[in-house]
Amino acid sequence: MKSKLPNIQETIFTTMSRAALEANAINLSQGFPGFQPDPRLRELIAKYTQTGSNQYAPMMGIPELRAAMSEKTEKCYGLQTDMDKEWTIVSGATQAVFSAVTAVVGEGDEVIILEPAFDSYDPAVLLNKGIPVHVPLNPTDFSPDWELIREKTTNKTKLIIVNTPHNPSGYVWTLEDLEELSNLVEEFGLFVVSDEVYEHITFDGRKHHSLLTHPVLRQRTFVCGSFGKTFHITGWKIGYCIAVPELTEEFRKIHQYVTFTTVRPAQHALAGYLKLETFFDLPAFYEKKRDIFNEGLRNSSLEFEPTQGSFFQQASYAHLSEISDKELALKMTKELKVACIPVSSFYADGSDHKIIRFCFAKNDTELVEATRRLENLSSIL
Ligand SMILES: Cc1ncc(COP(=O)(O)O)c(C=O)c1O
């Protein structure tokens, strides 16, 4: 059979997690929490499976969850959204991105993807016969290079996919970034898919600026979010898309034939849990982990700037070795027993800047032990 995605191989997350398992290494590669969600959330999902919420949910998601999320969005961002016309609950942010891209992109449409980028963006564009146009982020702080983005935008550009807080760099978009993007959107009539799965994980007093808070971007953007990252439930695969009614109408046409609807007991559990508002503690919870990890990482020979958001810390070894980042990641897993992700896998052409990414959503003891092992990094280079 002729492949629709001939260049796609096994994802690096699968490769590194398997390598970690085989080597019995501390797995700081794939982005999932190494601890359990709040017992109250686990009790809620158990309750809803026991009491009969086990059949199809409405296509757009149960009203209780859309209402709770709409309320949260008003509290967090001072933003009013219509729970019926603007919110759709879906099976994870990956599905939200795929459905939004499918709603917008047709044959020959160009789509700007800022690299390094999460690995699901390219295939979503390619499967819709769009043309990904990769634009590197600034190499020092991973902020968008607006001059370069403008250079690459043409009258064939239909969509730009953005991600803030950013995986893998942690860069958090500023209000100036939103302003730059809105100028581009107005000038070229672009649509935007904004992946905001780490919206509640920002550090050092930084604020996440949802693209929906900007009046111009609000009209053209599909914001894709995930409950997985906020509530330590990546295995539930549940997320959402927020967009103005005209865009949501098109989004739902796709969503209803991708999955139609999303796991119901999880929706009831989350609606109940949101009333507790515990997610507001998330920045402090992860900032402590970032600091514990970075304190240890300072004793390794790696160079890094503390991440601004997300639960990832990037680090450079460019000053230490010419070895490829993939080779280093595998060697580190086997010999030091710490697994990470080589950042070249976030570039379509495999650009290797000698940067690796660690996930610090793990127990503190594991983080301390991992950095203790990384003190021996020079012995394997
Ligand atoms: C930037 C980014 N977007 C989307 C996702 C996927 O989210 P979900 O599990 O809700 O599909 C991830 C998960 O790692 C991510 O890092």
Image (cartoon, rainbow, N blue to C red):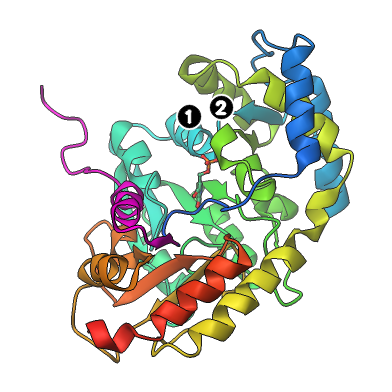
Quarter the N terminus occupies:
top left
How far apart marks 1 and 2 lie (CA) works out to 6 Å
Relative vertical location of residue 7 with respect to residue 362 in this rendering, above or below: above
Q: Earlier in the sequence, mark 1 or mark 2?
A: 1
The residue to which callout 2 is attached is 251
The front one of 286 and 365 is 365
* Numbered range of the magenta stretch: 1-27
Given residues 108 and 145, the one toward you in this image is: 145
- Horizontal relation, residue 8 to residue 174: left or right: left
Q: Is residue 307 left or right of residue 1?
A: right
> On residue 215, which mark appears?
none
Judging depth in this view, the residue of 245 and 270 nearest the camera is: 270
> Would you say 10 lies left or right of 208 here?
left
Q: Residue at x 32, y 55 (%)?
A: 16
Query: Residue 286 magenta-drawn?
Result: no
Percent coordinates x, y for residue 179 in the rendering: 64, 65
Could you say whether the residue bearing mark 1 is in a helix, strand or loop? helix
Residue type of the residue flagged with mark 1: Ala
Residue 204 position in % (x across, y down): 72, 77
Are the residues tagged 1 and 2 within 8 Å (C-beta)? yes
Vertical relation: 38 (above or below) 141: above
In which quarter of the view is residue 308 placed?
A: bottom right
Q: What's the mark number on residue 103?
A: 1
In the rendered image, is residue 142 in sight? no
Nearer to us in this view, 147 or 27: 27
- Is 340 drawn above or below residue 103 in the view shown? below
Q: Position of residue 192 (x, y in %)?
A: 53, 47
Name which residue type carries label 2.
Answer: Phe
Q: Residue at x 89, y 43 (%)?
A: 276
**Which residue corresponds to the image point at 21% horizontal and 43% vertical from the top-left?**
9
Mark 1 crowd level (few <14, some 14–19, many ≥20, 10 Å Cα): some
**Place of residue 325 in the rendered image (x, y in percent of width and height, measured from the top left):** 26, 71
